[in-house]
Image: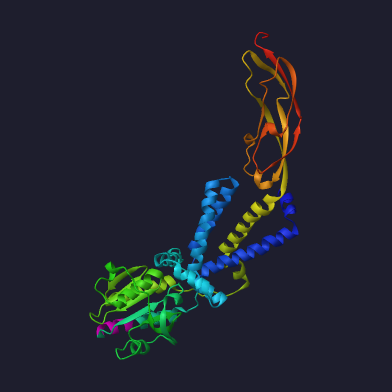
Amino acid sequence: MAFDFFREIGISGFFDIAFMSLLIYSVLIWFKKTKATFILTGIIIIGIVYLLARIFNLVLTTFVLQAFFAVILVAIIVIFQEELRQLFGQVPEKLSQFFEQIPERIRRFFERMPIWGTSSNPAREKSIISTYKEIQTLAQTITDLAKKRNGALIVINGKSNLVRHLDGGVDLNGEISEPLLKSIFDPNSIGHDGAVVIERGLITKFSCHLPLSRNFSQFQNRGTRHAAALGLAELTDALCIVISEELGTISFARNGELHQVGQEQVLLLLEDFYEEISPFNSSDTWHSVFTKNYREKVLAVFITLVLWFVFVYGSTLHHKTFAIPVQYTELPSGYEVAEINPREIEVSFLGPRRAFYFFNDKEIRLFLNITDINKGVKTVNISESNLSFPKDITLESIEPKTVQIRIETEIDN
């Protein structure tokens, strides 16, 4: 059985499956790197439900899911708009107009979705020593700025793509150091009012403007820096640190929450954040080629096999024969059926394999109308009009094509 199955796949089928597995694996890795595994999982689940709905002929479910795929397409475009820009270059004018027409709340909802399913193991290469040095430098600088009541806004990126949320700013790409940070946030500095962005151990930008939050209940009477920190924390998984120049307080914003913290908590909270997003060092060996991302590899092959089984193998034509009992209408009063020969007939059908996956032979019925038959033995011809069967299969043959029915009166018995 298994040998026949693999033989039916053939060489071209194996290449087909291998190519599609590689393609699906690439998509899975792309989703993983762009921090959208949560969304991909949802799409896969919906896709499985859609396939089952098609197989079981659930018309309403199929119709609703087809409409839902349009919503998924909009979500993917909004979530990966920056990646699409990088992939295709300048976004066409019509696509830019499309983004502008999407209501702000819907855009924020879609942009926030990937963060719900982020994993705790990003793939950045950074040594433990440099990470610890970075944490110490940031903690010391933050507490010093708070003591001097120098206002500051520092953004440390997690796994999100921040580019589409930043407005303005000056590229820097400088190493993190106390003198550099303190000079940027010096009240006499031109860019001290903007935000500093830290990514991959570097200060990538300064003097950036962030989207402002409208959750007034959280930042209450605090200033614009707090509204900006909370606004970015609502859209990404970045850690936004705010130092108030009026009060010298320190606030941390992350995952849509804004909290004031004490100076003694800064180092611990930074360590917790970096521990969550800290990378691991791995060597690219031949062993890692087979073990790295093994879950995605297995999932890609599994998805490909399911798709091939449903759409390719399942679309090949298949013959199947069923033994169907002969049923008949009620006779007029005083008559009864004494004998039917034969009591069952063999009916053969032709259709795609998937039509028979969950096929129930009770869906096939043979019904004879014998209300006009009188006493005696009669021969009744059987045709397709006497049969009831699913629409996605075709009637091939009926054996035998006639049935003999002997009718007697109740008096005879």
Coordinates of residue 222 in the picture (x, y in percent): 26, 75
The residue lying at 61 percent from left, 70 percent from top is 289
Q: Quadrant of the C terminus?
A: top right
Residue 358 lies, in percent from the top left, at 62, 43
For this rendering, which residue is in front, 263 or 375?
375
Q: Is residue 138 above or below residue 51?
A: below
- 146 is within the stretch colored magenta: yes
The reply, left or right, for residue 231 in relation to residue 148 is right
Q: Residue 43: horizontal and vertical position, in percent?
A: 52, 59
Q: Is residue 388 above or below residue 219?
A: above
- Regarding residue 268, the answer to whether it shows in the image is no
Q: Dividing the picture into quarters, in which one does residue 153 lie?
A: bottom left
Please indicate whether residue 199 sits to the left or right of residue 4 in the image. Answer: left
Query: Which coloring applies here?
Result: rainbow
Query: Which residue is painted at 45% across and 70% down in the image?
Result: 100
Q: Position of residue 174 (x, y in %)?
A: 44, 87
Instruction: Residue at 41% x, 84% y: name it.
Output: 169
Residue farthest to the bottom, as pictured: 188
Q: Is residue 176 visible?
A: yes
Asked if residue 411 lies in the magenta stretch, the reply is no
Residue 257, placed above or below residue 171? above
Q: Foreground: 312 or 159? A: 312
Q: Main secondary structure of the magenta part?
A: helix
Residue 395, image quadrant? top right
- In the figure, is residue 112 to the left or right of 352? left
Q: Which residues are magenta?
A: 139-147
In this figure, what is the number of numbered marks? 0
* Residue at (28% x, 71% y) in the render: 219
Front residue of 113 and 81: 81
Outermost residue to the top: 411
Report the residue that reaches farthest toward the left: 247
